[in-house]
Image (tube, rainbow, N blue to C red):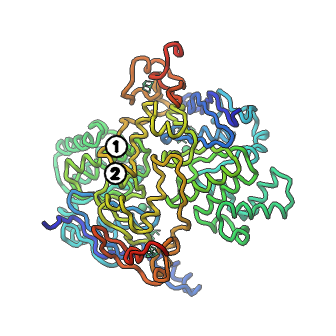
Amino acid sequence: MAEDIVLLADQVSRYFDVSRPWLQRTLAREPKQVLRAVDGVSFRVARGSTLSLVGESGCGKSTVARLAVGLYTPSGGEIRFEGEAISAARAQPDLRRRMNMIFQDPYASLNPRWRVRDIVAEPIRAFKLLSSTADINARVGALLTQVGLAAADGEKFPHEFSGGQRQRISIARALSSEPEFLVCDEPTSALDVSVQAQILNLMKDLQQRLGLTYLFISHNLSVVRHMSDRLGVMYLGRIVEIGPAAEIFANPRHPYTKLLLDAIPDLDMVGRSRTPVGGEVPSPINPPPGCPFHPRCPLANARCKTEKPQVLHLGTVEIACHAAEEGRTTA
Amino acid sequence: MALLDVVDLVVEFPTRRGVLRALDGVSLAIEPGEVLGVVGESGAGKSLTGAAIIGLLEPPGRVAGGQILLNGERIDTKTQEQMRPLRGKQIGAIFQDPLTTLNPLYSIGRQLVETMQTHMKLSDRDARARAIKWLEEVGIPAAAQRIDAYPHQFSGGMRQRVVIALALCAEPKLVIADEPTTALDVSIQAQIITLLKRITREHGTSVMLITHDMGVIAETADRVAVMYAGRVAEIGPVAEVVKHPAHPYTEGLMGSIPSLTHRVDRLRQIDGSMPRLTAIPTGCAFNPRCDKVFDRCRRHRPGLVPSGKTQAACWLYATEAANG
Ligand SMILES: Nc1ncnc2c1ncn2[C@@H]1O[C@H](COP(=O)(O)OP(=O)(O)OP(=O)(O)O)[C@@H](O)[C@H]1O
Ligand SMILES: Nc1ncnc2c1ncn2[C@@H]1O[C@H](COP(=O)(O)OP(=O)(O)O)[C@@H](O)[C@H]1O
Ligand code: SF4
Ligand code: SF4
Ligand SMILES: [Mg+2]
Ligand SMILES: [Mg+2]
């Protein structure tokens, strides 16, 4: 049976022009500078499942999130939502209604001057899902209850809530247009662990109850492990390894995935010592030639320094690494 | 004798609407060479505990009760003038944002040299040689060439390495590190934590490591204090607190952290949230969220009592005699 794909990304790129202003640049005889925030990324998200993307700061996760809901147009490649090009999908209210996004910062993403009731009702009004005030209020009350708040909380303003409660309001708002696909960009990164647990549990409950599909973005591998069916690991604008989450956690093949997994402090590591991989993420403006990970990679050899590894299928995972392709385990 | 002994520390902020009690009887001790982790949710009082120890409470915040003893000597009663020579020489500090510690106008070499010369008799040349040695020790490549560089010329991870060198270069007995890796990427975090662990072990420095990341504590600390609503809920050897927590809050907290090694369907969840300072419940501050709450918890406040290998502030472990 063919997989039911909600979102498909095919070789998607997004470049940003980060040159200095034209006059300064011309005077200094500088070339244009282009930052490849996302560089040829492909993935698909099946209905009712969660695909997570992990990676360190600046690797392009939020840019993918914004591409996925059509807030950015791709510089190359294509994104399809329910089989339609994302720009066409966004032009149709019925398709646009079916996707939404939850942001990292529950403080910045809620309008402080609006009552919670109006914040949550906004998509209902925008998509004209209900018309009578009584119906809208009843629906908002039901949404607030669904995310663990009280219907009466609708009368309050965002500043009257804690960070975790504000994230619940964001989720209620995201759900109010009855979407099927949610892009969640670091939805718990600003929260304490005990509050994070409440939100992650809520997101899983809602997924089961409403059959939601998630594109889940995080830098926290433990959270990702908890949430995902499939997992993509990003480095400098590319996906270096993608496949079933359980498989990647059990048997990471890409050297960067191994590095990340090894870098995560875990409760089970009492007294453990380790040798972290050195170096830092290079600038995406001038990424290293060949495999962008080679300056930090313990397996890098001459080929890695010149030839960009292509994505290849290894069992159920896709991976971009010469060593993995060659079955090499030393430099 | 403990290197640092904090006894019943109370920190208050006078405000227009009355006095806010942000720390309410915090007690903890750090032995020479020991790493004590301090964890808790934001607002639990971790940073204030650290700030009170180094004498850097922001006015109008003030120590309103209890004692802080360093090597048996009270330091909470010292004036700013008297504290200044202790900072750097006795107690070093590392904060979350390296830019709050580093002066953007001075080269990193100058900052290291000045810090050392403030506390030790060193010629310019010796101080510079030592500064290079410190930069090498914290893993700055080509230290001799980069000593005259300015903070903005370094990445976040490199800056935090410089801050570690600055905190340790006058060889203090105790370092207070408040969220030293929170602003950094995971792979850099791992580098910095490993560095901090190695370098303080080699110099026999005690560390108070404040973080909300239990994984970092599990890996780094010898003992850990779990804070809740301005109090210590539980304190003990890290393996015990992680694996066999006694306090119901610690138990809930550990269960709410997703694990890398075993997956569960639902995380354990503590409902509700930590109370604000203006609404701390009477009795045990955790009682409205506790699934083991009983009558006494709502009326009387529990003190730290032994419970297995840890100490917990919970009535479940108090004997009748102890609580009267
Ligand atoms: N509008 C923009 N203009 C210029 N550069 C941008 C823009 N948006 C993102 N970038 C750059 O693109 C790269 C990827 O950014 P992105 O925000 O997607 O990273 P991220 O993986 O979400 O990081 P984080 O974990 O810090 O949120 C970064 O180098 C960033 O500085
Ligand atoms: N300058 C201040 N004025 C009033 N309250 C403060 C001030 N600084 C901290 N607090 C309060 O003291 C409590 C503990 O703060 P803090 O030690 O910074 O927490 P943590 O570091 O554990 O997140 C919090 O409730 C905080 O709001
Ligand atoms: S391609 Fe080469 S440098 Fe890149 S990850 Fe694989 S082995 Fe390392
Ligand atoms: S004292 Fe009572 S309310 Fe507090 S943690 Fe113990 S059992 Fe729970
Ligand atoms: Mg981001
Ligand atoms: Mg703090």
Ligand 6 visible in quadrant: top right
- Secondary structure found at label 1: loop
Q: Chain of mark 1?
A: B
Residue drawn at (35%, 67%), measured in percent from left and top?
A64
Residue B191 seen in the figure: yes
* Image location (x, y in percent) of residue A32: 49, 83
Report the amino acid beneath label 1: Leu
Q: Are marks 2 and 1 in contact (CB under 8 Å)?
A: yes
Kindly tell me whether mark 1's CB lies below 8 Å from ligand 4: no
Seen in the picture, residue B263 relative to B46 is either above or below; the reply is below
Task: Count neighbours of disc 1 (C-alpha within 10 A) and say few if under 14, some if 14 to 19, many if 20 or more.
Answer: many
**Number of marks drawn:** 2
Q: Chain of mark 2?
A: A
Report the amino acid beneath label 2: His
- Secondary structure found at label 2: helix
Task: Count neighbours of disc 2 (C-alpha within 10 A) and say few if under 14, some if 14 to 19, many if 20 or more.
Answer: many
Asked if residue B29 lies left or right of residue A269, the reply is right
Q: Quadrant of residue A183?
A: bottom left
Residue drawn at (39%, 79%), measured in percent from left and top?
A309
Q: Quadrant of residue A177?
A: bottom left
Asked if residue B58 lies left or right of residue B262, the reply is right
Residue, disc 1: B267
Q: Nearer the viewer, residue B48 or A152?
A: B48
Residue, disc 2: A226
* Image location (x, y in percent) of residue B27: 60, 30
* Image location (x, y in percent) of residue B104: 68, 62
Q: Nearer the viewer, residue B152 or B119?
A: B119
Seen in the picture, residue B240 relative to A167 is either above or below; the reply is above
